[in-house]
Amino acid sequence: MKQLFYPQGIAVAGASRDPSKIGSLWAQSLISAGCKAAVYAINPAGGEIDGRPIYSSLRHTPGPVDLVISCIPREQVMSLLDDCAAKGVIAVYFYTAGFRETGKDEWAGFEHAVVERAKKGGFRIIGPNCFGVYCPEHGIPYGPFQLITAHGSAGLVCQSSGNMGKILEYGLENWVGFSKGVSIGNAADLEAGDFLEYLAADSKTRTIAMYLEGTRNPRGLFDALKMAASRKPVIVWKGGSSSAGARAASSHTGALGAEAGVWSGAVKQAGALEVGNLEELCDTLLLMDKVGPLPGGAGLGAVCGVTDGGGGEAVLISDLCAADGIDVPGLAPGAERELDDLVGRVGSVLCNPVDLSQKQRSAAVLDRVLCLLAEQGDIDMVMVYLNAGVILERFPADVIQSITQVLAGFRRRNGKPLVVVMPPGRAKCREGVHEALSMQGVPVLPGMQRAARALRNLMVYTLRRSA
Amino acid sequence: MKQLFYPQGIAVAGASRDPSKIGSLWAQSLISAGCKAAVYAINPAGGEIDGRPIYSSLRHTPGPVDLVISCIPREQVMSLLDDCAAKGVIAVYFYTAGFRETGKDEWAGFEHAVVERAKKGGFRIIGPNCFGVYCPEHGIPYGPFQLITAHGSAGLVCQSSGNMGKILEYGLENWVGFSKGVSIGNAADLEAGDFLEYLAADSKTRTIAMYLEGTRNPRGLFDALKMAASRKPVIVWKGGSSSAGARAASSHTGALGAEAGVWSGAVKQAGALEVGNLEELCDTLLLMDKVGPLPGGAGLGAVCGVTDGGGGEAVLISDLCAADGIDVPGLAPGAERELDDLVGRVGSVLCNPVDLSQKQRSAAVLDRVLCLLAEQGDIDMVMVYLNAGVILERFPADVIQSITQVLAGFRRRNGKPLVVVMPPGRAKCREGVHEALSMQGVPVLPGMQRAARALRNLMVYTLRRSA
């Protein structure tokens, strides 16, 4: 399996002299990403692409080829498979679609025949109907569009290439790096469980996120999930939980889903963390990547009013945390007294969340309030609500910078993790704050509703582990 | 009440020679917004601010003053109130805080005394502990930070100045204009119901959104809500639904809440639309502002795969719409056949949502698919999922432009409203697309989860009205 992610040679079947063809884009994407494997373009018509030869057959490539990307029409894949057997490749992944997911018996049978042919040829199939392997460490970009993130420690298994692309884009936007990933489409041969086993054993992968639509082998998937979840956090999103969603999933990857309740139960029993949609998966992955399971309990301290009135924020945070069952402990009497001196009672809300709006341009007060929360034994993590709208924009640049520094350095000084909630917005300073925090390992979530759900997941995972 | 929003003169008590003082900022904010009222700075120390005189007393101002903004400490307000009575003002709003919300009997009593003094003086109190009146049409900005949106038709009543600021910032980011608004803080005298009655009658206000933490007069509020909701859409968010949230609300505005269930029942019975948090309020307001209640039924047609793989998007949309009870009707057989020709079955999901990823750079195909949906009698509104991430960025500029034009012109050509879901992102083209769509009345929502909830609210409102 390792050779799939670190191949010596990759061949793209269907690359051609026309640079707008999907195969040509794919070859170009590999080359411009600085792929560490040799990249070969394959097309019976031959020719050149960007000054590099196009080989008329896989058999004519000069070096070893471990991985083949099929961008040719389904009608032509059988002869490609024969070439793959002759060349001794390890796996083929099919961007090529039009198999079982068409709902036609004829093409479902063809999919089966493809897998059988590969089995005889001694190699494996990824997909069909997928974007296949992603490995930034080895310079393998995601698909034909030059999408590549930082190398990091999050691993992905996705049954939808589109959703996997969106998770990677979220990673780019939020400074999450990935170890490797795979989009598996119809998963006619290699299945989610196979990749899960590999990622569980992979020392470069610390957290795993999965998007699934169905499986042909529920028992195998459950066992792999259980094994993987015993080693590292595994986040699972199952698409098609509704009947409309299941219909779309069937037409998408030919997936046969199970009852939503059965899935949820199995994921929970396996010790993995279930999420309900794309955003929840991304946000939870961000927290797992930058914070990880908390070492002790799961109490949250919250600070608001950093940029504008904090009273309404305190109510919002309290209600949403309560709705998601997040533990927001009360303040110790000593801390309340100190806050009274530090922030003042008039115009403030001095419980947890702490509204420090009456001293909001003072980075020193912010720092002290954060420390007061971190010093409390039943607070394991601190959250700051930072409204990066019009009013933050009006702050002097040095105030914005010193607030950012306090937040970015908090964990280093206090040992407890910090999370920042910063709604999207066009404020020019927003991007710089987001980057500075992310680079220091502070996850930035785009709204309180999403933050509450992701924090709940982190806390559920923390408490389940320590139970 | 009209003079509150269209005053002839506004005096800011507490403005001073020091431009960093809150009163000075407030006066400056009014002047730079081009306020149509005369603006007077008041401070016993006198002097000048930006070349304008500071009057030593309200009594010495040369012209009529309808509205006074109090930015002085609570200990000094009684003599200001005497001046207000002598000058014949209509209302005073208190940025000044430290009254009932402190939880101290002494200051609750003082709040009561302030209201009594005003009553004797023949004028009204807004707040205390609030930002007061907002009216972009009259050049009255929101608070001391030069926050002003376009003039439009959304009206606001908010018990939190911070949350009201956030709603206005959302409006700025999403091209929602406001007719007028008011932040009422502790609402010791004028209450939410009073303003609601005015906005219900105001011909310039088409939709009303409210944030409330509690009321002293539940019956009056209910009656006002019922009356207002019979005339225009009223969106209500009640903060402090959890016990932690209620504690924060009490410390914020001294609010005494009621049981969450009682509130929900009353809001529903009054015919208003209940939302649960800031984002849901903003998104629902955006849909009400740009689309309004649908004329007929509430069926949704959805299109995905516009920029990247659409299969996973189709599953996500289906699941989230199902979870929120949104009606996503199946396609008529004729439409399915035409899609088969137009998009092709291989690699596509040709139900509703329609995944057109196989023809994704063709604005003509997008246009025709949208029309096919709009032509169907049981589809009342169309939603397009547009992932404005890395891949859209890779599209040629003319393709992005023609896609944007198709979306922006859809309602004009088809008569049915369009909604676009476009997650946040750093793609350079994103902002231009967002602006072009918003300017043509197409609401842009920042994620599928939030979109589903807001669409559900629009549909609930539509169906309740037609029932």
Image (cartoon, coloured by chain):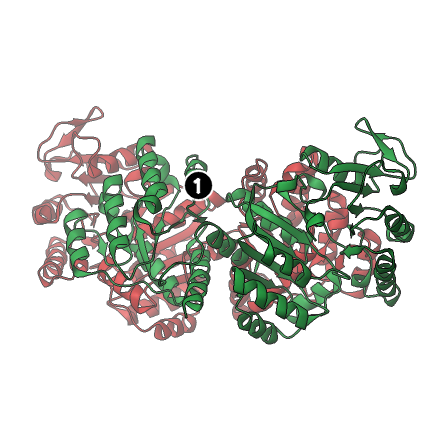
Chain colours: A red, B green
Pointer 1 residue: B434
Mark 1 is on which residue type? His
- Residue appearing at x 25%, y 54% in the figure: B375
- A101 to B433, vertically: above or below: below
Residue B193 or A467: which is nearer the viewer?
A: B193
Front position in the image: A68 or B286:
B286
Secondary structure type for disc 1: helix
Give the side of residue B68 with respect to residue B406, left or right. right
Q: Quadrant of residue B146?
A: top right
* Residue drawn where x is 86% and y is 49% of the image: B84
* Point 62% across, 70% down: residue: B222
Graded by Cα atoms within 10 Å as few (under 14), some (14 to 19) or many (20 or more), the crowding at tag 1 reads: many
Residue situated furthest top in the rendering: A51
Left or right? Give the position of B371 relative to B157: left
- Label 1 resides on the chain identified as B
Residue B144 spot, x, y in % from top left: 72, 42
